[in-house]
């Protein structure tokens, strides 16, 4: 019996998640023999994500196996990879030990289809990574495709089928479980020392029974090892909450959670994908996720030679530089101080310090609304420069205002952090208030109500209101508007850019709604007036409907409700609502 079995002890979820809660930032590594193809097959560029070129290029398993014969990552240097992660401020790495293609990137004794036995490289990179992680104090974690295996005679091929050699009707999933998946996970948990997290993927139609077997296996071998949320489609299995790829929720979640994300548009190395996110986008995503209480698992796709692409290294270094100056406002910080998104940036807290992460530095002043504490001091976190400020209460509206004077020079490109010493732990009145004439009323901050008792619609963990198929269900918000005048009102719904992959999320318009506020009613039909593709949302698009104009006679507290009059069912979807936006009409 392996030694780790012998050391088995009981470990609570809280204990095993302690490091994860503090970590905030990790490196996802998609590395496999697919890197050899770099996005092309037989001289043709294959559309789709790099690590799934076997599927997108309909490459038969017998031909795909030939790729291994040339896979020789002689430039792989575990120390270099882990140092890049450490320099970026990442606290854990999650590397693909086996992706859907079925190829083990470590020395597996139960399948010869592995990097040691099937490639000229004949060396186990996971051994080196385990040693480098130990040396640098970075947690080693493994990704394992537990349900899909496009090479195993009994493995699942989800969705579109192609010639994977083995007839579907002869497959016995239990045989794959018992002869490959369970033994390989056991190897991963017994050959490389402590493993921080087992990151499962695409549970598909995996039965509850089998998902539970994977879950229990991990905890039985290494009680401290976290089980990733995609072990099952059932939300109660897995030790933390996982969002979909590149999906950042629009509000905070008090449970430990993670978003995994690409740095360009793919995971596995793909030469043609040069759509790199900017350092500003990456740092703002890291900050927004931390402020909502989550972890950011950012991907790199090393080449077949074993190098992390220079575009990724460069961006990671910039993030690391930013974290060296501002990491105090990220690591081990409390999220959820403001439970919804703020246009100006984000807030985190630690003890009696509140950190305001400003995405734009508009020299002059910054007004923060809702802070109930007395501020003892304010400074720029990265430079220590003291800032002057004053606090006032607008009593008629009950709005607390903190006005901070900002010097000319922006201290940090991308995001500047102001650290406020308070008279106690941060207490923020999260009543919704406009800022510079704009106000977002999102699903997260709405009351979900129904004229007939229990509302039938739901708030998905992404923050989108879904299953809205009854006209008696409606949304309502209470908020403060600090300026009188006209406000343009728009509704934001969501659609899927790739309806084939997630057909449930494609868009349907034609619904009729009424917005009621300040004694006025705006009736409108949901139309596709403007589409935007938020860079961080990858497959999702925002569809804006311009509803009309609301007149606000005087500043004060208001209630706005969004009530459907008719819901279109042609595709049987109903509206997927992100929220309503108010924007002051200025100078017209
Ligand atoms: O199908 C995989 C995909 O190739 C990639 O590994 C991502 C990373 O989260 N997971 C699956 C899709 O969600």
Image (spheres, rainbow, N blue to C red):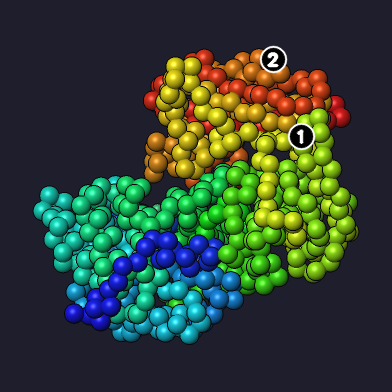
Which is in the foreground here, disc 2 or disc 1?
A: 1
Quick check: 282 left or right of 510?
right
Q: How far across and down, in percent of the image, does residue 459 sit?
A: 47, 35
Determine the residue positioned at 86% across, 53% down.
389
* Crowdedness near tag 2: few (<14), some (14–19) or many (≥20) residues, C-alpha within 10 Å: some
Q: Which residue is mark 1?
A: 398
Hey, which quadrant is residue 304 in on the image? bottom left
Q: Is residue 96 in view? A: no
Q: 116 or 434, which is in the foreground?
A: 434
Q: Which mark is residue 520?
A: 2
Q: Residue at x 80, y 62 (%)?
A: 379
Q: Is residue 223 left or right of residue 351?
A: left
Q: Earlier in the sequence, mark 2 or mark 1?
A: 1
The one nearer the camera, 149 or 93, is: 93
User: Where is 83 relative to 570, above or below?
Assistant: below
Image quadrant where one finds the N terminus: bottom left
Q: Tell me the distance, in whole angstroms, between the alpha carbons under discs 2 and 1.
A: 24 Å
Relative image position of residue 203 (x, y in whole percent)? 30, 52
The residue closer to the viewer here, 235 or 426, is 426
Counting from the top left corner in percent of width and height, residue 358 is at: 73, 54
- On the question of residue 92 being in view, the answer is yes
Q: Which mark is residue 139?
A: none
Q: Residue at x 68, y 36 (%)?
A: 432
The quadrant the C terminus occupies is top right
Above or below, 565 against 146 in this view is: above
- Circles 2 and 1: CB atoms closer than 8 Å: no
Q: Residue furthest left?
A: 170
The answer to whether 328 appears left or right of 413 in the picture is: left
**So how many labels did they put on this image?**
2
Residue at image point 20% right, 73% down: 111
């Amino acid at each position: 019996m392996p030694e780790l079995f012998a050391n088995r002890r009981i470990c609570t979820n809280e204990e095993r998640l302690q490091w994860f809660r503090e970590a905030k930032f990790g490196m996802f590594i998609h590395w496999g023999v697919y890197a050899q193809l770099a996005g092309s097959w037989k001289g043709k560029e294959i559309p789709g994500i790099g690590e799934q070129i076997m599927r997108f290029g309909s490459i038969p398993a017998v031909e795909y196996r030939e790729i291994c014969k040339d896979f020789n990552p002689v430039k792989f240097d575990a120390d270099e990879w882990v140092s890049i992660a450490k320099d970026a401020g990442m606290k854990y790495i999650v590397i693909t030990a086996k992706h859907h293609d079925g190829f083990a990137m470590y020395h597996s004794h139960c399948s010869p289809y592995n990097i040691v036995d099937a490639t000229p490289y004949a060396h186990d990179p996971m051994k080196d990574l385990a040693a480098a992680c130990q040396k640098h104090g970075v947690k080693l974690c493994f990704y394992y495709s537990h349900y899909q295996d496009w090479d195993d005679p009994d493995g699942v091929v989800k969705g579109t089928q192609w010639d994977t050699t083995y007839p579907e009707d002869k497959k016995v999933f239990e045989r794959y479980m018992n002869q490959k998946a369970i033994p390989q996970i056991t190897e991963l948990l017994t050959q490389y020392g402590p493993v921080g997290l087992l990151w499962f993927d695409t549970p598909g139609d995996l039965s509850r029974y089998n998902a539970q077997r994977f879950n229990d296996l991990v905890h039985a071998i290494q009680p401290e090892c976290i089980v990733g949320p995609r072990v099952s489609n059932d939300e109660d299995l897995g030790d933390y909450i996982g969002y979909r790829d590149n999906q950042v929720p629009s509000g905070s979640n008090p449970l430990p959670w993670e978003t995994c994300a690409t740095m360009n548009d793919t995971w596995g190395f793909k030469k043609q994908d040069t759509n790199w996110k900017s350092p500003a986008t990456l740092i703002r995503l890291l900050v927004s996720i931390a402020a909502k209480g989550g972890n950011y698992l950012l991907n790199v796709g090393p080449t077949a030679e074993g190098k992390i692409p220079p575009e990724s290294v460069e961006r990671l270094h910039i993030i690391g530089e930013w974290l060296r100056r501002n990491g105090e406002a990220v690591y081990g910080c409390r999220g959820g101080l403001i439970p919804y998104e703020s246009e100006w940036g984000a807030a985190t807290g630690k003890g009696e310090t509140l950190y305001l992460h400003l995405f734009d530095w508009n020299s002059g002043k910054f007004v923060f609304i809702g802070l109930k504490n007395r501020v003892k001091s304010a400074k720029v976190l990265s430079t220590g420069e003291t800032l002057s400020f004053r606090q006032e209460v607008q009593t008629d509206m009950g709005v607390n205002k903190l006005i901070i004077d900002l010097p000319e020079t922006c201290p940090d490109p991308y995001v500047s952090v102001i650290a406020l010493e308070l008279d106690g732990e941060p207490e923020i009145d999260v009543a919704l208030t406009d800022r510079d004439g704009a106000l977002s009323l999102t699903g997260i901050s709405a009351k979900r109500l129904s004229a007939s008792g229990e509302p039938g619609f739901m708030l998905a963990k992404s923050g989108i209101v879904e299953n809205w198929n009854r006209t008696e269900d409606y949304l309502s918000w209470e908020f403060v508007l600090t300026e009188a005048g006209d406000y343009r009102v728009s509704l934001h719904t969501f659609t899927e850019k790739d309806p084939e992959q997630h057909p449930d999320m494609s868009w349907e318009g034609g619904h009729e709604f009424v917005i009621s506020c300040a004694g006025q009613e705006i009736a409108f039909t949901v139309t596709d007036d403007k589409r935007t593709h938020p860079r961080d949302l990858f497959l999702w698009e925002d569809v804006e409907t311009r509803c009309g104009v609301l007149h606000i006679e005087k500043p004060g507290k208001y209630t706005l409700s969004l009530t459907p009059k008719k819901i279109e069912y042609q595709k049987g979807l109903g509206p997927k609502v992100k929220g309503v936006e108010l924007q002051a009409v200025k100078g017209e």
